[in-house]
Image (cartoon, rainbow, N blue to C red):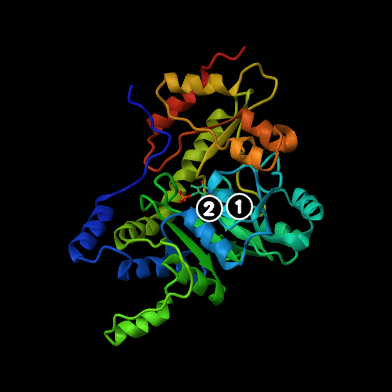
Amino acid sequence: MDPIPFAKPSLDSGDVARVVEVLESGWLTQGPVTRQFEAAFAEYVGAAEAIAVSSCTAALHLALEALGVGPGDKVVTVPYTFTATAEVIRYLGAEIVFSEVQPETLLMDPEALERTLARVGRDRVKAIVPVHLAGLGCDLERLRNVAAGIPFVEDAAHALPVDLLVGGERRRVGSIGEISCFSFYATKTITTGEGGMVTTDDPALAERMRVMRLHGINADAWRRYREKGSWGYDVVAPGFKYNLSDIQSALGLGQLAKADRFAVERQQLAQRYLAELSELQWLELPPGAQSWSSHCWHLFICRVRPGVGIDRQQVIDGLNEARIGTSVHYKPLHLHSYYASTYNLQPDDYPVSLDHYERSFSLPLFMGMSETQQQRVIQVLKTLQVP
Ligand SMILES: *Cc1c(COP(=O)(O)O)cnc(C)c1O
């Protein structure tokens, strides 16, 4: 039996042709194709500004830097996420404050956020970084009501495309909070191999992020000099090297054009899992779309029900024996040695995250997954020996 991967990018001959075209053009780094990709992305999510960067991690770093996060500040995020979400807070010398997630959705809990802000003092919190998990968006309206003016940097690595209900209107993630950060890593809903995008409606934040993306060089000044045919430019800050190349942007443009179709395909795969696996008593299926959010099914995170006499590792072993790829999203950050020791955290400081992590495993779900492949996954789960 052929192995079934956990995830796989969906590339076609059009994607390849676009990349080859850039290679043959002789202009490889950030240039006209990247500007095209930025414009197309801004339009797709409904943001005023989109800035292409080398990763979502870079996007998160630039976003917090632009908001002025620095030593002495606190930034609130969730423990139930990938380390990239929190590590960038440390890049800037600020303190991470974890706030618990909701048991059902594993998204930032508005009530927990309220308690967290009261505990650490809302004046010391410079930004809040919620994570739209697995393709389901956070209830940003409720979170923003609780935060009362503290800016949001959304980790939208799993959220292309997701629509949220805000102020009675459906709005796409990327056009709502102060800044949103997307990932085009190889396993994400669209890919450039490695890459990311940061969106905002605020021209001053956009300007700062554009400058810091490329060495702190004032782009306008650069353009002015170049128009005069001059070599001159001005460095206004010690910036980063976070730009995206035209090679990657060419791939991104083709992928973005297929993002809606990809989402429909993942939706169908998710619906089939939900329908076929609903009879399994030991299995807790992921929540679907909520009143406040659509679901783009980047991940299919399942949980083993407590007290059913089967543990998560048995399920993963069973799938692995059948050559089916799985993963665990996520080992909460407060269980990792760095975060635990830096902030003196105990496993049961975040009991919801701990409990769900111990029971969770993710099933393969990717564009191009065949019905036969999916039925194999379903059959293995149905025939697992549950005591
Ligand atoms: C993938 C991911 C990131 C980081 O994305 P990169 O583009 O690899 O830097 C950040 N947050 C979450 C939740 C992710 O899944």
Q: Can residue 263 be seen in this view?
A: yes
Query: With respect to residue 78, does 215 lie above or below?
Result: below
Residue 231 x %, y %: 29, 80
Instruction: Please state, as top left, top right, bottom left or bottom right, where the C terminus lies in the image.
Output: top right
Mark pair 1, 2: CA separation: 7 Å
Instruction: Give whichever of discs 1 and 2 has the lower sequence position.
Output: 1
Q: Mark 1 points at which residue?
A: 137
Q: Secondary structure under badge 1?
A: loop
Q: Name the residue under label 2.
A: 159
Residue 92 x %, y %: 58, 58
Residue 63 x %, y %: 55, 63
Tags 1 and 2 in contact by the CB under 8 Å rule? yes
Residue 176, image quadrant: bottom right
Write the residue at 68% across / 43% down.
343
Q: Is 5 on the left or on the right of 270, as rendered?
A: left
Write the residue at 70% across / 20% down.
307
Residue 188 x %, y %: 44, 47
Write the residue at 41% across / 81% down.
220
